[in-house]
Image: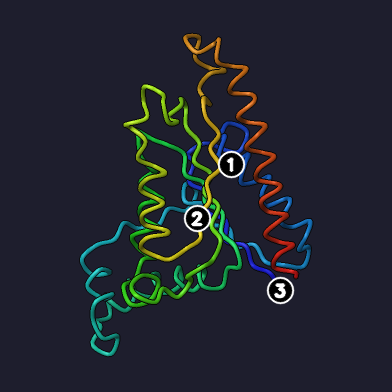
Amino acid sequence: MATLLLIDSSVFPEGGSASRSVTAAFRTAWEEQHPDGTVIHRDLAADPLPHLDGVAASAGFSDPATHTPEQQAAFALRVELAEELERADAVVIAAPMYNFTIPSTLKAWLDQVIIMGRTAGETPSAKGTPVTVVASRGGSYAPGTPREPFEYVQNYLEAVLNGGMGLDVDFIVPELTMAPSNPAMAELVPLYETSREKALQEAATKAKTLAENLAA
């Protein structure tokens, strides 16, 4: 059966979160194609992971047979996250832009799941798995815009997910999400609405295509 790994990281609930709305659309389209499949949903805002510490980090670079009880406990979580990624036929990650970068909760997931010699390195264990990143943002950081130099979300995630872990990364970018609530951006509301509808459609289409490819 098909398995989707869904990672949400917005601090806001679905009704107030652009990224959650898009990941929800992706999930709905995926489940329509795989009603008997499995969805592993990690809500990093509701159930945050611990940030990587010295114990968990050192466990990743040492022989498990030599682990202390503390290292065993810390590494067990890292293995659990790696196994979730390895079981997934597709992954969708919500990565809203907070202060020009990803939420710290998502960074914690990355730091925990990246295990050199397993999920990262010369032969990453999930290499080639399709990953759709929903990179929502309150303004626009597209090429040619004044804030293009401050686009650290897509650049970073492309480097770590593709370059470091060998995953097949694609981006959906809902932008100008602050326009409806910021009077100074009122004239941009139509562009926001267009971006939102495009993102929702892209999510549904992407999920359906991935599901159909898997079934084939």
**Residue 1, disc:** 3
Looking at the picture, does residue 154 appear above or below residue 85? Answer: above
On the image, the x and y values in percent for residue 209 come to 71, 56
Vertical placement of residue 79 versus 43, above or below:
below
> In the drawing, what numbered circle is on residue 20?
1
Label whose residue precedes the other's in the sequence (3 or 2): 3
Q: Nearer the viewer, mark 1 or mark 2?
A: 2
Along the line of sight, which residue is nearer the eye, 32 or 165? 165
Cα distance between the residues tagged 3 and 1: 25 Å
- The C terminus sits in image quarter: bottom right
Residue situated furthest bottom in the rendering: 65
Residue most extreme to the front: 144
Amino acid type at circle 2 is: Val
When asked about the image quadrant of residue 143, the answer is: top left
Q: Which residue is the site of mark 2?
A: 169
Q: Earlier in the sequence, mark 1 or mark 2?
A: 1
x and y percent of residue 117 in the render? 33, 77
Q: Residue at x 47, y 51 (%)?
A: 44
How crowded pointer 2 is (Cα within 10 Å; few <14, some 14-19, many 20+) is rated as some
Residues at discs 3 and 1 in contact (Cβ within 8 Å)? no
Q: Position of residue 160 (x, y in %)?
A: 36, 57
Could you tell which of marks 3 and 1 lies nearer the N-terminus?
3
